[in-house]
Amino acid sequence: MRGEEPIAMNTFLKSFNLGRKELNKGDFYKAQETWEHLWKYGTEKERFNIRGMIQLSVGLIKFKMGQFDAGIYLLKKSIKNTSWVFQKKIFLMKMYLIHLKNLRRVL
């Protein structure tokens, strides 16, 4: 049954990181399946924290399939549904990339 017993934190983190690695490799479907398992068996809080990541992976799947409107829709929902921690990390990563691009121009 969904969310009856919380997933152990180390199991949650291992599965989350596995999904992240799959996503970074471009295997969006595997990432989505990994995170769906966390959704199915997680608590309400765990499902809240994983919802945006599932939407991100499915949005990228839609882009890969050429369904751009659906992809954009899901990516926008993904941004809304990630917790503040994820949004902060994404913001910091963007700032870092901008900094690297500017550095490359100077060098």
Image: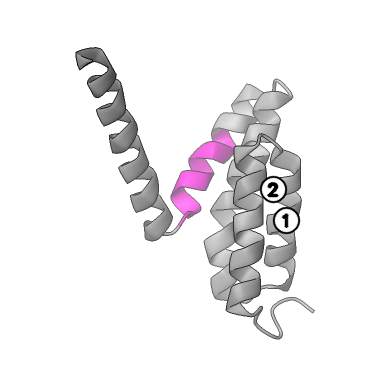
Q: Nearer the viewer, residue 33 or 2?
A: 33
Q: What secondary structure is found at the residue carrying circle 1?
A: helix
Location of residue 93 in the rendering, given as x and y in whole percent from the top left corner: 36, 41
> Is residue 98 highlighted in magenta?
no
Q: Is residue 27 above or below residue 11?
A: above
Q: Is residue 74 magenta?
A: yes
Tell me the crowding category of disc 1: few under 14, some 14 to 19, or many 20 or more residues within 10 angstroms, Cα based. Answer: some
Left or right: where 60 falls relative to 89: right
Q: In what element is the residue under mark 2? A: helix
Asked if labels 2 and 1 touch by Cβ distance under 8 angstroms, the answer is yes
Magenta stretch: dominant secondary structure:
helix
Residue 105 image offset from top left, x and y in percent: 24, 14
The N terminus sits in image quarter? bottom right
Q: Residue at x 31, y 44 (%)?
A: 92
**Residue shown at 62%/70% (left/top)?**
12
Q: Which residue is mark 2?
A: 31
Q: Which mark is residue 34?
A: 1
Query: Counting other residues with Cα less than 10 Å from the Cα at mark 2, is it few (<14), some (14-19), or many (20 or more)?
Result: many
Residue range (magenta): 73-82
Outermost residue toward the bottom in this view: 5
Q: How many marks?
A: 2
Outermost residue to the right = 1
Quick check: 34 left or right of 57? right
